Image (cartoon, rainbow, N blue to C red):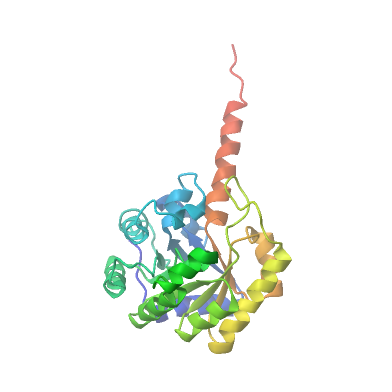
Amino acid sequence: MAKQFRRLGVRKRLEAEIKKRRPIVAAGAGIGLSAKFAEAGGSDLIIIYNSGLYRMDGLPSIAGYMPFGDANAMVKEMGLRHVLPIVQKAPVIAGICAYDLTRDMEVFLKELLAAGFSGVINFPTVGRIDGDFRQTMEDLGMSYRREAEVMGLAGSLGLFTMAYVFNPEESRMMARNGIDSVVAHMKTTTGGTVGAKRPMSLEEAGKRCSAIFKAALSVKRNVICLAHGGPIEGPEATEYIYRHTQAVGFVGASSIERIPVETAIRKTTEMFKAQRIKK
């Protein structure tokens, strides 16, 4: 069973890695197998998203934003039945739909604490939505500001807090609410069979990440800066981000549990099929 950590305990573990000049790696896990071997590979954090379940069903991660299921209920169930019993030492983070109008989020956060989660991250997030639809959500209370308030509440309850942010304004907002880690989100990860088809360049991603990190650090000097998504899909890309931004780590979901699995299963199956039976 996963060991539960309080907020300061998670920070202490991550800061120790940073002092050793080792990047923080947070791995998304849609199933216990992903969690087990991400931890075996040295992942510092295991994150459960509702999108992980869709991802491991061969569907695009962005399905996690659609009304196919109750995001918060799915994450709690995935944790209790599939991931928390498998993970041994890494803190487990719950992806929460913080603007859920059908729940008292303080009650739900306490349920996550009781279940054994060590932290939360805002996923699904309205930050990934734009245009008139996003504005309507903001106007009617399903807002990014609401997400920031819930994340601040989570921190006050002792949960480690991570925030997906998409621009400097959101980054400052989360930092003002005491967030422990900002995760610069470069939108849907490229690569594999269901990755983004219209990616930004790695150079552009670096510029955006840098602006996001600077904004958060201007409000909270000890915020932990991580990158995620878009063209940041493999070790070569993260190496570029580490050289050109203030990032000290990476959050990988498709990059860790989808793309490698797609490649490995396909190649292994091809090897079996390429054999010839002797008469």
The x, y position of residue 180, in whole percent, is: 47, 79
Front residue of 19/209: it is 209
The x, y position of residue 175, in whole percent, is: 50, 83
Query: Residue 120 sits in which quadrant?
Result: bottom left
Image position of 161 (left or right of 246):
left
The x, y position of residue 189, in whole percent, is: 59, 57
Residue 43 seen in the current view: no
Query: Residue 274 sits in which quadrant?
Result: top right
Front residue of 208/77: it is 208
Vertical arrangement, residue 193 with respect to residue 51, above or below: above
Residue at position x 38%, y 80% from top? 155
Number of on-image labels:
0
| Quarter of the image with the C terminus in it | top right
Front residue of 104/50: it is 104
Query: Residue 64 sits in which quadrant?
Result: bottom left
Vertical arrangement, residue 279 with respect to residue 249, above or below: above
| Quarter of the image with the N terminus in it | bottom left
Residue at position x 48%, y 59% from top? 28
Residue at position x 55%, y 40% from top? 265
Residue 165 seen in the current view: yes
Image position of 168 (left or right of 105):
right
